[in-house]
Amino acid sequence: MSCLTLQGIGIGGGIAIGHARVMTRTDIEVVHFRIAPDEVQSEIRRFEEAIRQTRKELETLWSSIPENAPTELGAFLSLHIMLLNDHTLSKEPISLIENQHCNAEWALQQQLDVLLAQFDEIEDDYLRERRADVVQVVERVQKALAGHESSAHAAGDGAQNTILVAHDLSPADMVLFKDCNHLAFITDQGGPTSHTAILARSLDLPSVLALRHARSLIREGELLIVDGVNGVVIVNPDDHTLAEYHLRSEEWLGKQKALLDIRTRRPVTRDGIELELFANIELPDDTSDALEYGADGIGLFRSEFLFLREEELPTEDEQFEAYRRVIQAMEGRPVVIRTLDLGKDKIAKWQNQCESANPALGLTGIRLCLAESQIFRTQLRAILRASAYGQVKLLLPMLSQIAEVRATQRHIEEARAQLREENIPFAENIELGGMIEVPAAAIAVAKFLGHLDFISIGTNDLIQYTMAIDRNDDMVSHLHDPLHPAVLQLIGHVIATADRMGKPVAMCGEMAGDPTLSRLLLGLGLRRYSMLPIQLLKVKQQLLTTDLATVRPLVERMLAAEESEQMRDLLLELNR
């Protein structure tokens, strides 16, 4: 096959050169046939056994998630288990079998067609994210009915120097491939914040998504170049191209090693503006990476991941020990603990899986905390107890009402009173902050700051809710635009208001960890960035070479721009 170049969405940066390992995809052709009335019950039992087998497979995969895997994998798998247990997939096909006397495969396919048609009619983009998940779950059940293995097959033997080529990767696939020695992933589907992108980014792999037809065009064993910087895949490169990319790869690796030299340098701009760079973590063991890359503290401890990996709720003592481990590991550096932020696509095994017409706008974030007051109170007690061991700050997710802050403050006071009565030590003046990730909170941020000690901007949801798009849907993910004028104006307004009121403001979303946006955010007034540990040095390097006096005029021009394309041109100029 001659040289072929494919263009997609680059994830993770860097360059990988290796041979293709094509993930086979067993497509099930669903046929329709009638069954005799006396065979209906046995057909129903066959369907129920397929559901049971699929559930067992997913739960087994859950229990086998590697300790060093991205913790989101557990959330994604729990979502698939939730969908499998939903009556629309597990019960409605039984009614079709009974009423139409059809085979189980056909009944399940009919129900899937009905669900997909409903998804196509829904305008809300976040809800459409569930479409791909439903298809993946149904495919697993169909394979169980056909007697096929649901586990994906490709490169599972841990072969060295391979690049995984797939149509898409489900959460179950990602668990299977987490410990394989792949240099990169490339997929036909996916967006910059899809399941596959999260895995690639957490492993710092140079990967390319949304290639559309890569799996059908690429053959097993073909030589590939994956350029995660530019989102390019080159199939069967000629000698000249291969030599050029070997040089580029060596240059990239050299730059990554050079980053370690700035690990201990203070983050200060060329003109003396002092900054703070914090790490986002999910579990206590992540503190080692935060310290290795020189974090000034923990800007976001996503505490919900303590709740996602177990069958039962973590006890107060279990939570306390986890928080204390983080605080002591950080040796006096600040630790910001966000309270439980479940809902949306993060569903714990112990949760009541109540149906919601729109989970992104339903019982999530602080709303769930206040609705589950006993769980919330237990977590607050654990955090307060841990505060006796270092500098702890409390962060509330997805605020939209001042009443939510006041209700939380009442819970905190009640927890303090209990601990005093029990003679359990805790820090009396723990700071309370709020996540600004809903446009209503961003617009009315001055009202919230009257009741909070600090705020943190969560750009992932802020962009999603502002733009009314689903960032995980590859059909619209290109519209998830951090440079949209409305997004930048909201961010600028939040930072300026906090500065005017003398309240600290940080950013902990994806934008904070993107070095191409570091100077833009600096020009908007941001001085505290929080990101994945692996992103810290790249952002620090960008900021160390920045002069605020040079940045500000370009940022002002960007704020005056009307189109995102114009903003991108200015961003290129900003990063020269």
Image (cartoon, rainbow, N blue to C red):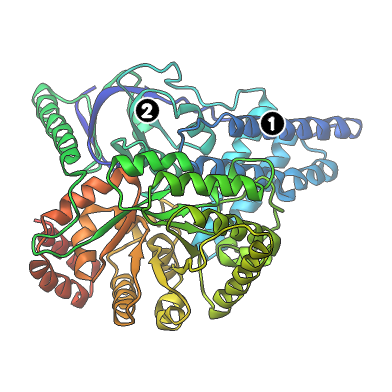
Q: What type is the residue that disc 1 sits on?
A: Lys
The image shows residue 219, relative to residue 299, as above or below, that is above
Q: Is residue 157 left or right of residue 571?
A: right
Q: Is residue 245 left or right of residue 307?
A: left
| Marked residue nearer the N-terminal end (2 or 1) | 1
Q: Secondary structure at mark 2?
A: strand
Q: Is residue 312 left or right of residue 151?
A: right
Q: Which residue is mark 1?
A: 56
Image mark for residue 38: none
Which of label 2 and label 1 is nearer to you? 1
Residue 515 position, x and y percent, is 22, 53
Identify the image quadrant of the N terminus: top left
The image shows residue 91, relative to residue 567, as above or below, that is above
Tell me the CA gap for discs 2 and 1.
26 Å
The image shows residue 531, relative to residue 257, as above or below, that is below
Q: Which residue is mark 2?
A: 164
Q: Residue furthest right?
A: 38
Q: What type is the residue that disc 2 sits on?
A: Leu
Q: Secondary structure at mark 1?
A: helix
- Relative depth, front residue between 242 and 529: 529
Identify the image quadrant of the C terminus: bottom left
Q: Is residue 570 left or right of residue 479?
A: left
